[in-house]
Amino acid sequence: MQARRLKQWDREYIWHPFTQMKDWDQVEPLIIDSADGIYLKDIDGKIYMDGVSSLWVNVHGHAQAHIDAALKKQIDKLSHSTLLGLANTPAIELAKRLIGIAPKGLKKVFYSDNGSTAVEIAIKMAYQYWQNIGQKKKIRLVHLSHSYHGDTLGSVSVGGIDLFHKVYRKLIFKTITLKGHGWQAVEELEALLKAKGESIAALVVEPLVQGAAGMRVWPEGVLKKMRALTQKYNVFLIADEVATGFGRTGKMFACEHEGVTPDFLCLAKGITGGYLPLAATLTTQKVFDGFLFDYKEQKTFFHGHTYTGNPLACAAALANLDVFQKERTLAKLSPKIKFLAKSLKMFYNLPSVAETRQRGFMAGIELKGRPEDRIGAKVCQQVRRYGVILRPLGNVIVLMPPLSISIEELDYLLMATYRSIEDCVNKTQE
Ligand SMILES: *Cc1c(COP(=O)(O)O)cnc(C)c1O
Protein backbone atom coordinates (compact mmCIF):
# COMPACT_ATOMS: atom_id res chain seq x y z
CA MET A 1 0.00 0.00 0.00
CA GLN A 2 2.71 2.44 1.08
CA ALA A 3 4.77 1.38 -1.94
CA ARG A 4 1.92 2.07 -4.32
CA ARG A 5 1.32 5.48 -2.78
CA LEU A 6 5.00 6.45 -3.05
CA LYS A 7 5.07 5.46 -6.70
CA GLN A 8 1.99 7.58 -7.32
CA TRP A 9 3.43 10.57 -5.45
CA ASP A 10 6.72 10.27 -7.29
CA ARG A 11 4.84 10.60 -10.59
CA GLU A 12 2.70 13.36 -9.23
CA TYR A 13 5.36 15.57 -7.64
CA ILE A 14 8.90 14.88 -8.83
CA TRP A 15 10.59 16.19 -11.97
CA HIS A 16 13.62 13.94 -12.32
CA PRO A 17 16.98 15.30 -13.53
CA PHE A 18 18.29 14.45 -17.01
CA THR A 19 15.01 12.62 -17.64
CA GLN A 20 12.41 12.87 -20.40
CA MET A 21 9.43 12.85 -18.07
CA LYS A 22 7.16 11.75 -20.90
CA ASP A 23 8.91 8.36 -20.72
CA TRP A 24 8.96 8.21 -16.94
CA ASP A 25 5.27 7.24 -16.70
CA GLN A 26 5.84 4.18 -18.84
CA VAL A 27 8.04 2.34 -16.35
CA GLU A 28 7.55 1.48 -12.70
CA PRO A 29 9.74 3.86 -10.70
CA LEU A 30 12.36 2.06 -8.66
CA ILE A 31 12.33 3.64 -5.21
CA ILE A 32 15.37 3.14 -3.00
CA ASP A 33 14.70 2.99 0.70
CA SER A 34 17.92 1.79 2.30
CA ALA A 35 21.45 0.69 1.46
CA ASP A 36 24.35 -1.27 2.86
CA GLY A 37 27.83 -1.62 1.39
CA ILE A 38 27.54 -1.70 -2.38
CA TYR A 39 23.86 -2.74 -2.29
CA LEU A 40 20.71 -0.64 -2.54
CA LYS A 41 17.35 -1.91 -1.32
CA ASP A 42 14.05 -0.73 -2.80
CA ILE A 43 10.74 -0.24 -1.03
CA ASP A 44 9.61 -3.73 -2.07
CA GLY A 45 12.66 -5.25 -0.37
CA LYS A 46 14.53 -6.07 -3.59
CA ILE A 47 18.30 -5.70 -3.50
CA TYR A 48 20.46 -4.20 -6.26
CA MET A 49 24.19 -3.79 -6.69
CA ASP A 50 25.09 -0.10 -7.03
CA GLY A 51 27.08 -0.40 -10.27
CA VAL A 52 27.57 3.35 -10.79
CA SER A 53 28.22 4.41 -7.19
CA SER A 54 24.96 6.37 -7.01
CA LEU A 55 26.09 8.52 -9.92
CA TRP A 56 29.83 8.31 -9.36
CA VAL A 57 29.87 9.54 -5.78
CA ASN A 58 30.05 6.53 -3.49
CA VAL A 59 33.55 5.42 -2.51
CA HIS A 60 33.62 3.01 0.43
CA GLY A 61 30.05 1.71 0.24
CA HIS A 62 26.79 2.83 1.81
CA ALA A 63 26.24 2.88 5.57
CA GLN A 64 30.02 2.80 6.04
CA ALA A 65 30.52 2.42 9.79
CA HIS A 66 33.23 5.06 10.25
CA ILE A 67 31.51 7.74 8.16
CA ASP A 68 28.16 7.00 9.80
CA ALA A 69 29.71 7.38 13.25
CA ALA A 70 31.50 10.61 12.32
CA LEU A 71 28.26 12.11 11.04
CA LYS A 72 26.31 11.08 14.12
CA LYS A 73 28.98 12.65 16.31
CA GLN A 74 29.00 15.86 14.30
CA ILE A 75 25.21 16.15 14.25
CA ASP A 76 25.21 16.30 18.04
CA LYS A 77 27.64 19.22 17.96
CA LEU A 78 26.87 21.43 14.98
CA SER A 79 24.89 20.81 11.79
CA HIS A 80 25.36 24.15 10.12
CA SER A 81 26.95 27.52 10.67
CA THR A 82 28.07 29.93 7.96
CA LEU A 83 31.58 30.50 6.57
CA LEU A 84 30.61 34.09 5.73
CA GLY A 85 32.22 35.96 8.59
CA LEU A 86 32.66 32.84 10.74
CA ALA A 87 34.64 29.61 10.62
CA ASN A 88 33.80 26.12 11.85
CA THR A 89 35.86 23.20 13.10
CA PRO A 90 35.30 20.51 10.44
CA ALA A 91 35.68 23.00 7.56
CA ILE A 92 39.09 24.09 8.87
CA GLU A 93 40.30 20.55 9.53
CA LEU A 94 39.16 19.38 6.10
CA ALA A 95 40.83 22.28 4.29
CA LYS A 96 44.13 21.36 5.94
CA ARG A 97 43.68 17.68 5.07
CA LEU A 98 42.82 18.45 1.43
CA ILE A 99 45.87 20.64 0.98
CA GLY A 100 47.91 17.82 2.53
CA ILE A 101 46.86 15.29 -0.13
CA ALA A 102 46.45 17.61 -3.14
CA PRO A 103 49.16 18.06 -5.79
CA LYS A 104 52.01 20.11 -4.35
CA GLY A 105 51.62 23.87 -4.72
CA LEU A 106 47.89 24.11 -4.06
CA LYS A 107 47.46 26.15 -0.89
CA LYS A 108 43.90 27.43 -0.50
CA VAL A 109 40.47 25.81 -0.34
CA PHE A 110 37.25 27.53 -1.42
CA TYR A 111 34.16 25.48 -0.59
CA SER A 112 30.86 25.11 -2.38
CA ASP A 113 28.37 22.28 -2.68
CA ASN A 114 28.46 20.64 -6.11
CA GLY A 115 30.71 20.00 -9.07
CA SER A 116 29.19 22.69 -11.27
CA THR A 117 29.83 25.38 -8.69
CA ALA A 118 33.34 24.08 -8.04
CA VAL A 119 34.05 24.75 -11.74
CA GLU A 120 32.16 28.07 -11.85
CA ILE A 121 34.24 29.28 -8.94
CA ALA A 122 37.48 28.33 -10.68
CA ILE A 123 36.33 30.12 -13.83
CA LYS A 124 35.33 33.26 -11.96
CA MET A 125 38.53 33.28 -9.92
CA ALA A 126 40.71 32.78 -13.01
CA TYR A 127 38.92 35.55 -14.88
CA GLN A 128 38.91 37.97 -11.97
CA TYR A 129 42.55 37.32 -11.12
CA TRP A 130 43.68 38.75 -14.47
CA GLN A 131 41.25 41.67 -14.09
CA ASN A 132 42.49 42.34 -10.56
CA ILE A 133 46.13 42.50 -11.55
CA GLY A 134 45.45 44.69 -14.57
CA GLN A 135 45.79 42.16 -17.41
CA LYS A 136 42.39 43.17 -18.72
CA LYS A 137 42.70 41.45 -22.09
CA LYS A 138 42.89 37.96 -20.56
CA ILE A 139 39.20 37.05 -20.68
CA ARG A 140 38.75 33.95 -22.86
CA LEU A 141 38.31 30.38 -21.67
CA VAL A 142 39.46 27.40 -23.66
CA HIS A 143 37.98 23.92 -23.33
CA LEU A 144 37.92 20.59 -25.11
CA SER A 145 35.23 19.24 -27.38
CA HIS A 146 32.97 16.68 -25.66
CA SER A 147 33.79 18.33 -22.34
CA TYR A 148 31.41 18.28 -19.40
CA HIS A 149 31.82 20.53 -16.39
CA GLY A 150 28.31 20.71 -14.96
CA ASP A 151 24.89 22.18 -15.61
CA THR A 152 24.91 25.76 -14.34
CA LEU A 153 25.38 28.35 -17.08
CA GLY A 154 29.04 29.09 -16.42
CA SER A 155 29.96 25.44 -16.54
CA VAL A 156 27.66 24.89 -19.53
CA SER A 157 29.65 27.63 -21.31
CA VAL A 158 32.75 25.44 -21.15
CA GLY A 159 30.75 22.32 -22.02
CA GLY A 160 31.04 20.60 -25.37
CA ILE A 161 28.33 17.93 -25.41
CA ASP A 162 25.75 19.06 -27.96
CA LEU A 163 22.90 17.02 -26.51
CA PHE A 164 23.18 18.85 -23.19
CA HIS A 165 24.56 22.23 -24.19
CA LYS A 166 23.43 23.24 -27.69
CA VAL A 167 20.04 24.63 -26.71
CA TYR A 168 21.65 27.22 -24.40
CA ARG A 169 24.18 28.47 -26.94
CA LYS A 170 22.74 31.99 -27.19
CA LEU A 171 22.52 32.33 -23.43
CA ILE A 172 26.07 31.40 -22.47
CA PHE A 173 29.42 33.19 -22.78
CA LYS A 174 31.79 32.84 -25.70
CA THR A 175 34.62 30.34 -25.39
CA ILE A 176 37.21 28.66 -27.59
CA THR A 177 36.77 24.94 -28.22
CA LEU A 178 39.70 22.68 -29.10
CA LYS A 179 38.16 20.41 -31.67
CA GLY A 180 40.63 17.53 -31.67
CA HIS A 181 41.18 14.80 -29.13
CA GLY A 182 44.44 13.88 -27.38
CA TRP A 183 47.63 14.99 -29.14
CA GLN A 184 45.62 16.79 -31.79
CA ALA A 185 44.11 18.97 -29.07
CA VAL A 186 47.63 19.66 -27.80
CA GLU A 187 48.70 20.87 -31.23
CA GLU A 188 45.66 23.12 -31.50
CA LEU A 189 46.30 24.45 -28.03
CA GLU A 190 49.88 25.33 -28.83
CA ALA A 191 48.93 27.18 -32.01
CA LEU A 192 46.16 29.00 -30.17
CA LEU A 193 48.33 30.05 -27.24
CA LYS A 194 51.09 31.19 -29.55
CA ALA A 195 48.67 33.37 -31.50
CA LYS A 196 46.31 34.55 -28.77
CA GLY A 197 47.78 33.63 -25.39
CA GLU A 198 47.57 37.21 -24.14
CA SER A 199 43.76 37.14 -24.43
CA ILE A 200 43.26 33.75 -22.77
CA ALA A 201 42.49 33.43 -19.06
CA ALA A 202 42.42 29.66 -18.62
CA LEU A 203 42.20 26.20 -20.11
CA VAL A 204 39.57 23.96 -18.47
CA VAL A 205 39.97 20.19 -18.67
CA GLU A 206 38.80 16.92 -17.15
CA PRO A 207 42.22 15.34 -16.70
CA LEU A 208 42.77 11.81 -18.11
CA VAL A 209 39.13 10.86 -18.57
CA GLN A 210 36.22 12.80 -20.07
CA GLY A 211 33.56 11.04 -18.03
CA ALA A 212 30.22 12.35 -19.25
CA ALA A 213 31.42 12.14 -22.87
CA GLY A 214 31.28 8.37 -22.42
CA MET A 215 34.59 7.65 -20.64
CA ARG A 216 36.85 9.10 -23.33
CA VAL A 217 40.36 8.33 -22.16
CA TRP A 218 43.31 10.64 -22.89
CA PRO A 219 46.57 9.35 -24.30
CA GLU A 220 49.42 9.39 -21.81
CA GLY A 221 51.45 12.58 -21.62
CA VAL A 222 48.76 14.94 -22.92
CA LEU A 223 47.97 16.42 -19.52
CA LYS A 224 51.64 17.07 -18.74
CA LYS A 225 52.12 18.74 -22.11
CA MET A 226 49.03 20.90 -21.65
CA ARG A 227 50.36 21.96 -18.27
CA ALA A 228 53.72 22.88 -19.80
CA LEU A 229 52.06 24.91 -22.56
CA THR A 230 49.73 26.80 -20.24
CA GLN A 231 52.70 27.64 -18.03
CA LYS A 232 54.77 28.80 -20.97
CA TYR A 233 52.04 31.15 -22.21
CA ASN A 234 50.93 32.36 -18.78
CA VAL A 235 47.46 30.80 -18.91
CA PHE A 236 45.77 29.08 -15.97
CA LEU A 237 45.02 25.38 -16.01
CA ILE A 238 41.73 24.42 -14.36
CA ALA A 239 41.59 20.69 -13.61
CA ASP A 240 38.03 19.51 -13.10
CA GLU A 241 38.53 16.36 -11.03
CA VAL A 242 34.92 16.20 -9.93
CA ALA A 243 34.66 12.72 -11.48
CA THR A 244 38.28 11.56 -11.41
CA GLY A 245 39.12 12.67 -7.86
CA PHE A 246 39.19 10.48 -4.76
CA GLY A 247 40.72 7.37 -6.18
CA ARG A 248 38.72 6.81 -9.35
CA THR A 249 41.73 6.62 -11.64
CA GLY A 250 43.78 4.52 -9.22
CA LYS A 251 45.52 7.46 -7.56
CA MET A 252 43.91 9.97 -5.24
CA PHE A 253 43.83 12.55 -8.05
CA ALA A 254 44.25 12.04 -11.80
CA CYS A 255 46.79 14.87 -11.99
CA GLU A 256 49.20 12.74 -9.92
CA HIS A 257 49.63 10.27 -12.81
CA GLU A 258 51.54 12.91 -14.74
CA GLY A 259 53.02 14.89 -11.87
CA VAL A 260 50.88 17.91 -12.70
CA THR A 261 49.84 20.70 -10.35
CA PRO A 262 47.02 22.72 -11.89
CA ASP A 263 46.27 26.32 -10.89
CA PHE A 264 42.78 25.22 -9.87
CA LEU A 265 41.64 21.78 -8.76
CA CYS A 266 37.86 21.26 -8.69
CA LEU A 267 36.56 18.53 -6.39
CA ALA A 268 33.09 17.24 -5.59
CA LYS A 269 31.39 13.85 -6.18
CA GLY A 270 33.55 11.46 -4.11
CA ILE A 271 34.71 14.08 -1.59
CA THR A 272 32.25 13.00 1.13
CA GLY A 273 32.42 9.33 0.19
CA GLY A 274 29.07 9.87 -1.52
CA TYR A 275 27.23 10.98 1.60
CA LEU A 276 26.47 14.68 1.33
CA PRO A 277 26.77 17.51 -1.19
CA LEU A 278 30.12 19.24 -0.87
CA ALA A 279 32.65 20.68 -3.29
CA ALA A 280 35.98 22.42 -3.09
CA THR A 281 38.00 24.56 -5.47
CA LEU A 282 41.67 24.44 -4.54
CA THR A 283 44.09 27.06 -5.79
CA THR A 284 47.58 28.47 -5.35
CA GLN A 285 49.06 31.21 -3.19
CA LYS A 286 49.63 33.23 -6.38
CA VAL A 287 45.91 33.27 -7.24
CA PHE A 288 44.97 33.99 -3.64
CA ASP A 289 47.40 36.90 -3.50
CA GLY A 290 45.82 38.34 -6.64
CA PHE A 291 42.75 39.11 -4.57
CA LEU A 292 44.51 40.87 -1.68
CA PHE A 293 43.84 44.59 -2.07
CA ASP A 294 42.38 47.41 -0.01
CA TYR A 295 38.66 46.81 0.27
CA LYS A 296 37.81 50.03 -1.52
CA GLU A 297 39.44 48.77 -4.71
CA GLN A 298 36.55 46.27 -5.01
CA LYS A 299 38.73 43.32 -5.91
CA THR A 300 37.29 40.94 -3.33
CA PHE A 301 36.02 37.58 -4.55
CA PHE A 302 32.31 38.30 -4.11
CA HIS A 303 31.06 34.76 -4.32
CA GLY A 304 29.71 32.32 -1.77
CA HIS A 305 26.94 29.79 -1.39
CA THR A 306 24.79 29.72 1.69
CA TYR A 307 25.80 26.21 2.76
CA THR A 308 29.50 26.76 2.01
CA GLY A 309 31.68 24.68 4.34
CA ASN A 310 28.75 22.85 5.90
CA PRO A 311 30.05 21.09 9.02
CA LEU A 312 28.17 17.82 8.44
CA ALA A 313 29.43 17.52 4.89
CA CYS A 314 32.97 18.39 6.00
CA ALA A 315 32.80 15.80 8.80
CA ALA A 316 31.75 13.17 6.25
CA ALA A 317 34.64 14.23 4.00
CA LEU A 318 37.14 13.93 6.85
CA ALA A 319 35.81 10.46 7.68
CA ASN A 320 36.02 9.54 3.98
CA LEU A 321 39.74 10.39 4.00
CA ASP A 322 40.22 8.41 7.24
CA VAL A 323 38.74 5.34 5.57
CA PHE A 324 41.10 5.73 2.57
CA GLN A 325 43.99 5.45 5.08
CA LYS A 326 42.57 2.81 7.41
CA GLU A 327 41.36 0.50 4.66
CA ARG A 328 44.33 1.17 2.34
CA THR A 329 41.70 1.71 -0.34
CA LEU A 330 44.08 2.70 -3.14
CA ALA A 331 46.47 -0.20 -2.56
CA LYS A 332 43.56 -2.64 -2.58
CA LEU A 333 42.15 -1.07 -5.72
CA SER A 334 45.07 -1.96 -7.92
CA PRO A 335 44.25 -5.70 -8.40
CA LYS A 336 40.61 -4.77 -9.01
CA ILE A 337 41.64 -2.38 -11.78
CA LYS A 338 43.65 -5.19 -13.39
CA PHE A 339 40.74 -7.60 -13.06
CA LEU A 340 38.43 -5.04 -14.67
CA ALA A 341 40.86 -4.55 -17.56
CA LYS A 342 41.11 -8.29 -18.15
CA SER A 343 37.36 -8.80 -17.97
CA LEU A 344 36.54 -5.94 -20.32
CA LYS A 345 38.43 -7.71 -23.11
CA MET A 346 35.80 -10.44 -23.05
CA PHE A 347 33.17 -7.92 -24.17
CA TYR A 348 34.72 -7.83 -27.62
CA ASN A 349 33.21 -11.32 -28.08
CA LEU A 350 29.87 -9.55 -28.34
CA PRO A 351 29.31 -8.33 -31.90
CA SER A 352 27.26 -5.37 -30.61
CA VAL A 353 30.20 -3.94 -28.66
CA ALA A 354 32.04 -1.20 -30.56
CA GLU A 355 34.71 -0.41 -27.97
CA THR A 356 35.56 -0.70 -24.30
CA ARG A 357 37.44 2.06 -22.50
CA GLN A 358 38.96 2.16 -19.06
CA ARG A 359 41.19 4.26 -16.88
CA GLY A 360 41.55 2.98 -13.34
CA PHE A 361 38.12 2.30 -11.92
CA MET A 362 36.24 4.24 -14.60
CA ALA A 363 35.00 2.13 -17.48
CA GLY A 364 32.68 2.43 -20.45
CA ILE A 365 31.40 -0.15 -22.92
CA GLU A 366 30.30 1.49 -26.14
CA LEU A 367 27.58 -0.33 -28.05
CA LYS A 368 26.91 -0.10 -31.74
CA GLY A 369 23.62 1.42 -32.84
CA ARG A 370 21.86 4.68 -33.56
CA PRO A 371 21.31 7.02 -30.61
CA GLU A 372 17.52 6.92 -31.15
CA ASP A 373 17.46 3.16 -30.54
CA ARG A 374 18.58 3.92 -26.97
CA ILE A 375 20.35 0.61 -26.64
CA GLY A 376 22.27 1.88 -23.58
CA ALA A 377 19.03 2.60 -21.74
CA LYS A 378 17.65 -0.81 -22.70
CA VAL A 379 20.69 -2.67 -21.40
CA CYS A 380 20.55 -0.73 -18.13
CA GLN A 381 16.86 -1.59 -17.76
CA GLN A 382 17.62 -5.25 -18.48
CA VAL A 383 20.49 -5.45 -15.99
CA ARG A 384 18.05 -4.73 -13.16
CA ARG A 385 16.73 -8.25 -13.67
CA TYR A 386 20.14 -9.44 -12.54
CA GLY A 387 19.91 -7.17 -9.51
CA VAL A 388 22.24 -4.44 -10.74
CA ILE A 389 21.71 -0.69 -11.14
CA LEU A 390 23.54 0.96 -14.05
CA ARG A 391 23.04 4.26 -15.82
CA PRO A 392 24.23 4.71 -19.42
CA LEU A 393 25.63 7.69 -21.27
CA GLY A 394 23.91 7.35 -24.63
CA ASN A 395 25.23 4.14 -26.17
CA VAL A 396 27.89 3.76 -23.52
CA ILE A 397 27.32 1.47 -20.54
CA VAL A 398 29.17 3.00 -17.61
CA LEU A 399 30.75 0.74 -15.00
CA MET A 400 31.79 2.70 -11.96
CA PRO A 401 31.14 0.71 -8.78
CA PRO A 402 32.23 1.85 -5.32
CA LEU A 403 35.99 1.40 -4.82
CA SER A 404 35.15 -0.98 -1.95
CA ILE A 405 33.62 -3.61 -4.26
CA SER A 406 35.22 -7.07 -3.98
CA ILE A 407 36.66 -8.96 -6.96
CA GLU A 408 33.81 -11.50 -6.70
CA GLU A 409 31.20 -8.75 -6.76
CA LEU A 410 32.98 -7.04 -9.63
CA ASP A 411 32.92 -10.34 -11.49
CA TYR A 412 29.16 -10.55 -10.95
CA LEU A 413 28.69 -6.96 -12.14
CA LEU A 414 30.60 -7.71 -15.35
CA MET A 415 28.76 -10.98 -15.94
CA ALA A 416 25.36 -9.33 -15.42
CA THR A 417 26.33 -6.54 -17.82
CA TYR A 418 27.58 -9.02 -20.41
CA ARG A 419 24.38 -11.07 -20.25
CA SER A 420 22.18 -7.98 -20.42
CA ILE A 421 23.89 -6.80 -23.60
CA GLU A 422 23.41 -10.28 -25.06
CA ASP A 423 19.74 -10.36 -23.98
CA CYS A 424 18.98 -6.95 -25.50
CA VAL A 425 20.64 -7.68 -28.80
CA ASN A 426 18.87 -11.02 -29.13
CA LYS A 427 15.57 -9.37 -28.28
CA THR A 428 16.01 -6.71 -30.96
CA GLN A 429 16.78 -9.36 -33.56
CA GLU A 430 13.69 -11.46 -32.71
C1 LIG B 1 29.46 15.45 -12.40
C2 LIG B 1 30.46 16.38 -12.93
C3 LIG B 1 30.33 17.77 -12.77
C4 LIG B 1 29.11 18.40 -12.16
O1 LIG B 1 28.94 18.08 -10.83
P1 LIG B 1 27.53 18.33 -10.12
O2 LIG B 1 27.75 18.00 -8.69
O3 LIG B 1 26.56 17.40 -10.80
O4 LIG B 1 27.16 19.76 -10.34
C5 LIG B 1 31.35 18.57 -13.22
N1 LIG B 1 32.44 18.06 -13.81
C6 LIG B 1 32.59 16.73 -13.99
C7 LIG B 1 33.85 16.24 -14.63
C8 LIG B 1 31.61 15.84 -13.57
O5 LIG B 1 31.74 14.53 -13.79
Image: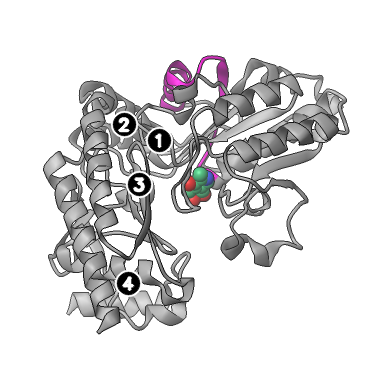
**Label 2–label 1 contact, CB within 8 A:** yes
- In the rendered image, the vertical position of residue 374 relative to residue 228, given as above or below: below
Query: Sequence-wise, which precedes: disc 1 or disc 4?
Result: 1
Q: Which residue is mark 3?
A: 363
Q: Which residue is mark 2?
A: 320
Rendered residue at 50%/19% (across/down): 259
Q: Please provide percent x and percent y for residue 16.
A: 44, 68
Tag 2: amino acid: Asn
| Residue stretch rendered in magenta on the structure | 89-115
How far apart marks 2 and 1 lie (CA) works out to: 7 Å
Helix, strand or loop for disc 3:
strand
**Label 2–label 3 contact, CB within 8 A:** no
Tag 1: amino acid: Ile
**Label 1–label 3 contact, CB within 8 A:** no
How far apart marks 1 and 3 lie (CA) works out to: 20 Å
Helix, strand or loop for disc 1:
helix
Q: Please provide percent x and percent y for residue 98.
A: 45, 23
Query: Sequence-wise, which precedes: disc 2 or disc 3?
Result: 2
Residue 378, label in figure: 4
- In the rendered image, the vertical position of residue 405 relative to residue 16, given as above or below: above
Q: Describe residue 380's horizontal placement relative to residue 413 as left or right.
A: right
